[in-house]
Image: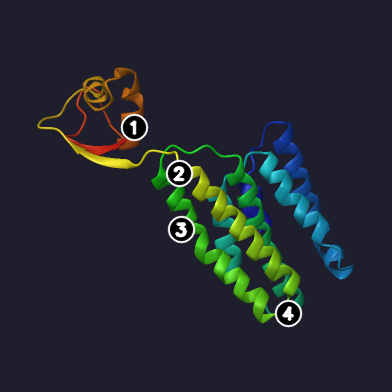
Amino acid sequence: MLALLLSFVPAKGHAGINARTAIGDTRANAYKLLIEDAMGPPLDNCFDQARQAGITWQQLETVRRQTEQEKPVSLGAVLLQNAGIRLCLATEGYILAGMSFVSRQQVDTIKEALFQPFQDAEEIAADDMDQMTFQALITLHGAITNHLVQTALPLPRMLNYQFFMPLPSLVMAYKLYSDASRADELRVENKVVHPAFCPMLGEALSA
């Protein structure tokens, strides 16, 4: 878990160095921390430092999925696995709160991607009769969902378009938006290889 988290932290910059130091120290002292039942705060700090270093919610999802696939045997290992998954979800929520979105589809994709992970984590907490963690997960899930729903309301939708022939991105942008300066937006969204010959079919924002 921490090795994968470390792989996503940039090697340069003050925040990256802090995150790498925190993760490295936690890994080096893992046995002692586990024996003393003191892994919680350092592990939490690792995720917080990684967030400050610029880790993305997609990268955290990769960490969560790998952690979820592990097969712990001892009770302590199971507890550590669950803690790692919950920290991934909590940190993702923190990151999403500060993100800007372009379209409703982008928001909906994230909302759908997080639904099952939260459901699984909530079910585990319920099975363990861990009422405090269960309530915390329910509250966090609800807060993230509400934030995403409210964020999506004013955003435009992605719509499909079709032209009769390949056109330059500047021409397409003017025809779609009456604004040729949005040509770059079309190129990025549709992964256009050459801006002078955009595909006839593509996607564009509704506004």
User: Looking at the picture, which amino acid does disc 4 mark?
Assistant: Ser
Q: Which residue is mark 2?
A: 153
Figure colour scheme: rainbow
User: Looking at the picture, which amino acid does disc 2 mark?
Assistant: Leu
Mark 2 to mark 4 CA distance (whole Å): 46 Å
**N-term-proximal mark, 3 vs 1:** 3
Q: Residue furthest left?
A: 164
Mark 3 residue crowding within 10 angstroms, few (<14) / some (14–19) / many (20+): few
Quick one: 150 or 48, which is closer to the camera?
150
User: Up-down: is 146 above or below 152?
Assistant: below
Indicate left or right for 149 with 79 as reference.
left
Q: Which mark is residue 86?
A: none
Label 4 residue SS:
loop
Q: Taking the image as drawn, is residue 70 in sight?
A: no
Q: Which residue is mark 4?
A: 74
Mark 4 residue crowding within 10 angstroms, few (<14) / some (14–19) / many (20+): few
Q: Please identify, in this view, whether the residue under mark 4 or under mark 1 is nearer the observer.
A: 1
Quick one: 121 or 157, which is closer to the camera?
157
Q: Which residue is mark 1?
A: 207
Mark 2 to mark 1 CA distance (whole Å): 13 Å
User: Looking at the picture, which amino acid does disc 1 mark?
Assistant: Ala
**N-term-proximal mark, 4 vs 1:** 4
User: Looking at the picture, which amino acid does disc 3 mark?
Assistant: Glu
Q: Which mark is residue 112?
A: 3
Quick one: 84 or 113, which is closer to the camera?
113
The location of residue 161, given as percent across then percent down, is 21, 38
Q: Residue at x 15, y 29 (%)?
A: 166
Q: Are marks 3 and 2 in contact (CB under 8 Å)?
A: no
